[in-house]
Image (spheres, helix red, strand yellow):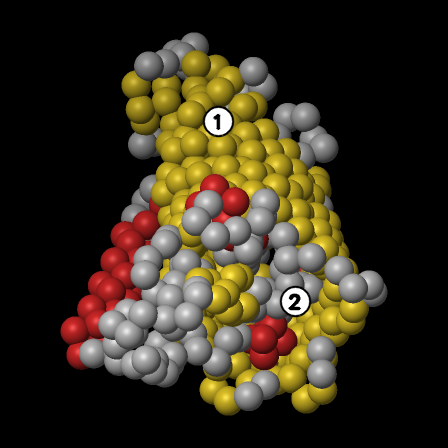
Amino acid sequence: MKNRPCVFERFIIPLHTHKTIYRPLNHIRLRLTYRFIIATAVIFFTTSAYSQNGGSKSSYSRFGLGLLNDQSQSWNRAMGGVGVALPSGSKLNNMNPASYAYLDSLSFILDAGMSGNFGQMTQNGNSKNVNSASFDYITFGFRLRKGIGMSVGFRPYSTIGYNYTSTSPEAYRDENTGAIIRNTTSYQGDGGLRQVFAGLGWKPFTNFAIGTNVSILWGGYTHAMLQSFTVGNSSSSSFDSFNFIQNASVLTYKLDFGAQYAFRVSTKDWLTLGAAVGLGHKFDGEAFLYRFMTTGDTLRVNGEKDGLDIPMTYAAGIAWQHKNNLVVSADAHYQEWGSCRIPTMVISDNEVTYPSTNKIYKNNFMLKAGVEYTPDPFAIGKYYKHIKYRMGVSYSSPYMNIPQGEGIKSTTHDGPCELGVSLGLGLPISNPYNSRSTVNIGFQWLRRSSAVSTLITENYLVLNLGITFNERWFMKYKIQ
């Protein structure tokens, strides 16, 4: 009998029918598969433990809950981070839980990624290079039964990591000695929130799916502001300095819901519409502030018991698929951070209070667009035609305000907006059983800047590296 092609997950796979080519899945392959998954999970969880705070060295992570992490994965991050209208199939899409309903019944998918950031921070003509590495996510996906898919995973929600000093531009002269007195303030912070989630997607009708993600958020942050004085060229402890440490410990939940509807617009074209909603709410967080005086006195100020919030979020997306080799998608996101609160230090007439306020946050929106092109996914024996070429753009308005000044006279400026351009490749891992596993490589240029020219401008080249391990666990083989 001649070799015949079999359509599987929209890829043609040659099935040779020689009598000795197919064998039942044996214990050796099972053990190797289990060990691969366990080893990969251990590696990435260990990486997260050591590099969680290394993911950010931005001074903008000093405010709010820090810098919000991109919730896309390595494959769609190269497409600008789109995903609201993209289904899961041979790869996972955690941006819309409705996509899990399209998971293949024969596969177990592991998707994991990390990134390296190579950047430069510029302010008032001065520049500094900053490099960091971070764990991005690890997720698993599989189908429970017909029309129902599930995914579980771990990823950071926000990151905090900074260490910089600021010297007051105003110098004072000692009236007795004539020495110059300067004030230097050191700012240090680390922490962030992490999340584990489990989600279900269900397809109740043809081409229509709904789903939900349930997440647990936990973590915290530490912000320190330490003052020092110099008289001439020597440090001095004779001045009463302001030294503060802010701490918070967080444990709460997060609920997200999504829907997708796909329909054919021609014999070669499909259009998919997607929508997602995240529920905002108040949550308990043990937040407090310490003030240390030069005299040795310590003052503790407690924050409000339920003084932290996460926002309502809304997202809509559209995706167009031509044949099986071209996908074009766009997303719009809106987050109601402006109604969220966080404990904030207030100094007025030398009195320190720690109320929860929404002055740090502001509502923001994000726009994303991307494309993925595969030359010929049905080509047999031509590896380069199975490579996926990706590109995308993204824009995010500020979600935070930057305080200026102290006390009742303090003002705020807009925080940084973000502009990104990305390129990437999906390289298939070919083996005798399938070619749906891929190594995803992406490059992203990211610019973070404020409309206020005196604030820091950050430019980054981000290298994203991930793997989508898609193994046909549940295939039944026949011996011919």
Query: In this orientation, does residue 295 appear?
Result: yes
Residue 185 is situated, as x and y percent measured from the top left of the image, at 44, 33
Q: Is residue 36 above or below residue 206?
A: above
What residue type is disc 1 on?
Gln
Of residues 357 and 276, which is closer to you in this image?
A: 276
Query: What distance separates the C-alpha of mark 1 from that of mark 2?
Result: 31 Å
What residue type is disc 2 on?
Pro
- Image quarter in which the N terminus is found: bottom left
Q: Earlier in the sequence, mark 1 or mark 2?
A: 1
Q: How many marks?
A: 2
Q: Is residue 205 above or below residue 327?
A: below
Residue 416 is situated, as x and y percent measured from the top left of the image, at 64, 40
Q: Can you tell which mark lies on residue 311?
A: 2
Query: In this orientation, does residue 318 appear?
Result: no
Q: Can you tell which mark lies on residue 269?
A: none
For mark 2, give the secondary structure. loop
Residue sitting at 69 percent across and 70 percent down? 276
Residue hosting label 1: 120
Q: Is residue 15 above or below residue 125?
A: below
For mark 1, give the secondary structure. strand
* Horizontal side of residue 378 vs 435, given as left or right: right
Marks 1 and 2 close (CB-CB < 8 Å) = no
Residue sitting at 39 percent across and 33 percent down? 131
